[in-house]
Image (cartoon, rainbow, N blue to C red):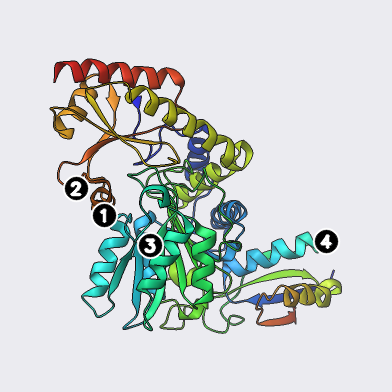
Amino acid sequence: MLYLDNPATSFPKPASVEQAMVNAMRLAPGNPGRSSHAGAHAAAELVYSAREALASLFSADPARVVFCQNATHALNLAIKGLLSPGGHLLISELEHNAVLRPAEALAAQGCPFTCYRVGRGRDFTSPEAILTSLKNNLTPQTQMIVACHRSNVVSAELPLREIGAFAAEHGLFFVVDASQSAGCAAIDMEACRISALCAPGHKGLFGPRGSGFVIFGKDVPEEKIGTLIEGGSGSDSASPRMPDELPERLEAGTLAVEAIAGLGAGADYIRKTGAGTIDEKESYLAALARDRLAHLPGVILYTVPRPVGSLVLFNVRGMSCAAAVDALDRAGIALRAGLHCAPLAHRFNGTLREGALRAGFGWFNTEQDVYTLTDALRTLSRRS
Amino acid sequence: MNRCLITLPSLTLAQKARSLLQANGIASSVERLSPERAEKGCGWGIVLSCALAQQAVRVLELSNLPYRKLEPLR
């Protein structure tokens, strides 16, 4: 199988990730933070090592790394935890449903949201265009700005430093969805004034499915972060309330130790390999694919000015994206088709009605994979 | 060696304290507190040489790491 569905979840994983998970299962029995025997201590050390590994990738405090089951969980924690009753939320017009749906749910409870624009044409993703839209949509009740660092549909990257500076200037929380950039783009939480950085473990960070995290910035008052679930935390158990301190405040129940161990190993792999090196290769492969697809008359290629990252979005003329992705699957090529859980981004792209196919190149893909994909599409587009 | 205990609000903060102290040349180990030592039923702390305890407390304070108590272990 030629795997090109990395934006959904990365494959394969480095061998060190698999090994870390097996080691956790075999060598670290016990519930971290609950018991005091050697096995529980071993599990607790695995968890803390993963916190440190992630914190070092994003210039953050390891004690502010909160483990979640995925980025959706992380975004819900951050957005709902930080927003106060009656607060107004600004989200970009490219956000995934992991942001749009909590925003809709909050709007039904009296916390409205507005989509800010990310620019058009030459101004696409320009800080000036985005800041203008933010200023125009700011209200006295605005409490938070949410931005996807990189879109999972269009090859766009939003300017985190400028948005973060704007948020800080206006006393707003700044929540970042780093689902498509964690592991391949440098993100300095302090420099970008990020209040909460949310990411899955299982995409660019090479961790397993079921892993994710939110990292809270040092200036976010931890005792004020609302909880989504309450339960056992391993400390202050005589109190009926969740502890004030992060991360335990937001980590009720048993942690997914094997998944976290895998995520920690993935973060270590990124640190050793270099996020920039990974991004360079993935971007090169995507650019090569775009260049070849642009010469296929039977393929509709969707592009933006200054494309960033590993995604290529396209359709095959005369075929639904569902039929095209099935045909590619039969040819041994794995892609994703449809709306990619991001109707806002598809509306921006003009593909909300019909959807599109998305190829996402990963660190373990090669130039030959690009040729295999484009040759298959040449054949498919001639048949359609 | 006379051992001292610095109690902290959580396991993660105890681990963080240990890392901070290690970076400052102070060895310590993370320990689960007995219920009678923990203020609210379950707790965590770091155990270290009493000779380095005051220095350790200064390191934690300079890093704004909230600790609850410093006491000798008997």
Residue at 38% across, 66% down = A133
Tags 3 and 2 in contact by the CB under 8 Å rule? no
- Nearest to the observer: residue A289 or residue A80: A289
User: Tag 2 or tag 3, which sits nearer the N-term?
Assistant: 3
**Tags 3 and 1 touching, CB below 8 Å:** no
Q: Earlier in the sequence, mark 1 or mark 2?
A: 1
Q: Chain of mark 2?
A: A
The percent position of residue A227, horizontal first and vertical second, equals 39, 74
- Residue A232's quadrant in the figure? bottom left
Identify the element where label 1 is drawn: helix
Foreground: disc 4 or disc 2? 2
Q: Position of residue A370 (x, y in %)?
A: 39, 22
Secondary structure type for disc 2? loop
Residue drawn at x 58%, y 76% as measured from the top left: B9
Location of mark 2 (residue): A352
- Whether residue A253 is visible, yes or no, is no
Q: Is residue B45 left or right of residue A329?
A: right
> Viewer-proximal residue, B65 or A34?
B65
